[in-house]
Amino acid sequence: MMSTVDNPMVYGGGTAIQILIKQGILFADNFVDLAGIPGLTEITADAAGLRAGPMVTARGMETDDRVRRVAPLASTAYRHVANPRVRNTASIGGNLAHGDYRLDPPPALLALDATVEATSVRGTRSLPVRQFFVDFQQTALAPDELVTAVRIPAQPTGSAYRFVKYSSLSANDWPCASVAVLIAGREVHIGLGALAPVPRYASFDATGMTDQAAVDAALEVIAPLLDPIPDVRGSVRYKRRLAQVIVEDAVRGAWKDLDNA
Ligand SMILES: Cc1cc2nc3c(=O)[nH]c(=O)nc-3n(C[C@H](O)[C@H](O)[C@H](O)COP(=O)(O)OP(=O)(O)OC[C@H]3O[C@@H](n4cnc5c(N)ncnc54)[C@H](O)[C@@H]3O)c2cc1C
């Protein structure tokens, strides 16, 4: 006889689920704990980039030497998640599947053109992170799909990056706004967090530009993407202004590193 499991929910690190259940927002009769499945915490790296299993923790991405070497922007972004207690537990698969617009890693993964490996009984498909965040707390994952890996291309030699997070309440809090900038081969890639109902991405060609021209171009390309949600961390007006400040800061900082390379 075939057995069924009523209303199951995938359990990664549980840092998001537990809060949502306590708040009465999420309900599940059964949990499928991914911690019991072997092989989901592996990180592999080669010249092309990294592949990290879904149960690698944020802390793992922060501290792993291969991640630091191959994709330092990603490592830096994971270091900004909450506090060590949360980072030691939160999984990178759960972080993405949670789909919250304020999460810190997505702006970096957008700038780096990372890919999510999604698996179901139908097989495995690759979803570019740039197409992953569909709407407010909604991802491109089908209901029966699991995040089974995150692939991050290696940062090109001679590229420069910055991750800037501003928290208006306390240092360990969710961001009021965050931005990741990667400048590679004069192409400027920008990922924005907490500045719209979904993490957002923009890019432009900075060939022949001065640093000031690049800042101006960055502010121009992000302007139509800004659609902040007002909350306890800031009003719409405040977040729009903050976006300009942190994007300028990130582009200038990365540009300076290019000059010094
Ligand atoms: C106090 C606190 C402060 C925080 N501050 C920040 C912050 O500053 N910056 C930030 O970025 N984040 C912050 N977070 C959020 C934190 O990053 C997320 O809660 C965490 O990344 C979610 O990962 P998890 O493994 O715990 O997910 P879970 O809680 O286990 O799961 C979250 C969702 O993803 C689903 N899921 C889990 N794994 C998979 C998978 N492999 N495939 C498909 N679906 C899956 C679950 O079913 C659930 O719907 C904070 C959280 C807390 C509790």
Image: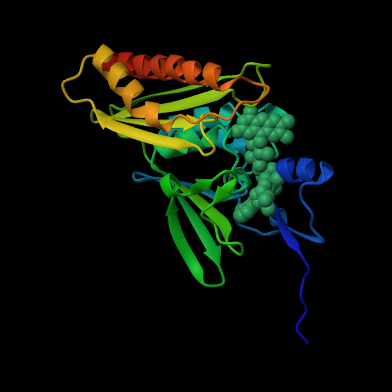
Q: Quadrant of residue 226?
A: top left
Residue farthest toward the bottom in the current orientation of the protein: 1
User: Residue, x 57% and y 45% (percent of image)?
Assistant: 96
- Give coordinates of residue 256: x percent, y percent: 32, 13
Q: Is residue 13 visible?
A: no
Please say if 33 is above or below 122.
above
Q: Quadrant of residue 224?
A: top left
- Give coordinates of residue 89: x percent, y percent: 70, 39
Please say if 147 is above or below 90.
below
Tell me the quadrant of the picture where the N terminus can be found: bottom right
Q: Quadrant of residue 27?
A: bottom right
User: Residue, x 70% and y 53% (percent of image)?
Assistant: 35
The answer to whether 252 appears left or right of 163 in the picture is: left
The answer to whether 80 appears left or right of 206 in the picture is: right
Residue farthest toward the left in the current orientation of the protein: 208
Pick the residue in front: 51 or 136: 136
The answer to whether 223 appears left or right of 5 in the picture is: left
Please say if 166 is above or below 203.
above
User: Residue, x 51% and y 25% (percent of image)?
Assistant: 178
